[in-house]
Image: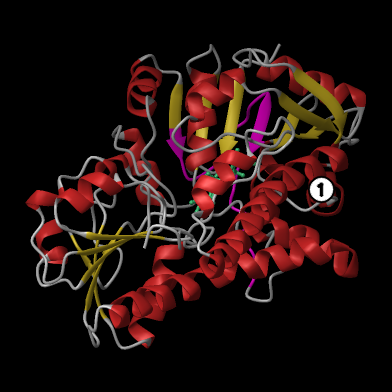
Amino acid sequence: MTKTVCVVGLGYIGLTSAVMFSNYGMKVHGVDINPSVVRNINEKKLHIEEQGLQEMLDRAIDEGMFTASTTPQEADAFIISVPTPINPNKTANLDYVKEATKSIVPYVKKGNLVILESTVPPKTVENIMIPELMKTGFEIGTDIYVAHSPERVIPGKIFEELVNNDRIVGGINEKSAQLTKELYECFVQGEIHLTDATTAELVKVMENTYRDMNIAFANELSKIADNIGVNIWEAIQFANLHPRVNIHFPGPGVGGHCIAVDPWFLVEIGGDNAQIIHHSRHINDSMPAYTAQKTLSILDENNIVGGKVAVLGLAFKGNVNDIRESPSIAVIDYLQQLGLEVVSFDPHIKENNHVTQTQHLEEATRDADILLVLTDHNEFKTFDPHTITTNHKIVFDTKNCLNRKVWQNAGFQYYLLGDAKNR
Ligand code: SAJ
């Protein structure tokens, strides 16, 4: 029975997994190459925003069940949860996975289990991890066990989903899968499904690619709706009433280090067999420029030349403090290329992460010729437009998160991405 776990990589997924295990009876040692992340964690200071994480971290540290450092320690099980970004040429960058696997080799003992949680292209366990783990000198699959169990949780509901989501476990053999199942059973109440490592790797990438392609369909529809005087949000809601239809929603682009990244893994291995996957990426990556152009045409329509745009929302999605691959950054670049002045504000991003950013809403909206909502934070949904002073009362909502009537009653012209009906 596993008692000690060493988690390598203390980001969104690694830290929440580590804290979860240590709150369910496992003695956990967390590892991160970034010394300030480690220092902050040991001082119970968080670098990520997630409901319930602070309380669970405090309890785990107070009860002596969780420590963190920059080097691994011996353990019954090792969990690797490091980033898997893409290179500029859109190929998978598996360096962190390789380095993390290398880093645990001196600590792996006979009978140990090694699990990869990061989202990776199929065959990564086989082609990247196992060659490294063979340097332990142990027989893979008999002396030590290896599996892939991809995380499937969504920021904002991580702990709820860690417990309730079904979990896919892909072992390099049955014993590896079984041991991994037994480990996660300490907190997983969803069903745990066993398969092989390559299938588990593909399943996770398929899930995120399904979402990316569905969003691409919605974004294409929003462009079509614009030319035929339809409100695409209304149309999608009607279409989704059909028992077999579940269209996602358009927006200024797809961000984060998951949906905007993982489909490229399939494009890389699929080549010409990944046509719609590849095209969907291009459609979603076209939305920031489309949104910036729409903003300019709204200003033109109101005879405003040049002008100041108050960008509301830098995070890649609502109620998180994560700007990785955020569409907002790309939209701002395009707006500036169009000669517009930009000041941005995001209530979740406490330190200035962008040159245009201010921590004061008033500074962003003062003298603004248009308010551009790019992230559906709850704070924006409950804004009182009467309290906002601008140069022109124009708001462009790209996430359908504002109450049209409230803003119109406050004298604002309200524009909605994908809605050519209510102009
Ligand atoms: N988005 C849209 N339209 C939609 C839904 C999302 O434009 O209808 C945009 C969001 O604004 C954001 C991006 O897509 O920019 C991604 O948002 P997301 O809500 O899909 O969230 P992620 O990336 O945080 O989480 C996804 C989840 N995957 C799926 O739902 C299939 C989560 O379960 C995964 O664990 C996570 O990726 C991951 O880590 O892989």
Question: In front: 349, or 284?
Answer: 284
Question: In front: 12, or 258?
Answer: 258
Question: Residue 14, can we see it?
Answer: yes
Q: Is residue 354 left or right of residue 324?
A: left
| Residue 83 is covered by the magenta coloring | yes
Label 1, ligand 1: CB separation under 8 Å: no
User: Looking at the picture, which amino acid does disc 1 mark?
Assistant: Lys
Q: Is residue 154 left or right of residue 115?
A: left
Q: Residue at x 38, y 42 (%)?
A: 48
Q: Which image quadrant is residue 346 in?
A: bottom left
Q: Which image quarter is the C terminus in?
A: bottom left
Q: Position of residue 154 (x, y in %)?
A: 53, 37
**Can you identify the residue that label 1 sits on?**
135
Q: Residue at x 91, y 24 (%)?
A: 174
Q: Position of residue 134 (x, y in %)?
A: 85, 45
Q: Position of residue 191 (x, y in %)?
A: 73, 16
Span highlighted in magenta in the image:
68-87
Considering the whole magenta stretch, tell me its main secondary structure: loop
- Residue 80 position (above or below residue 122): above
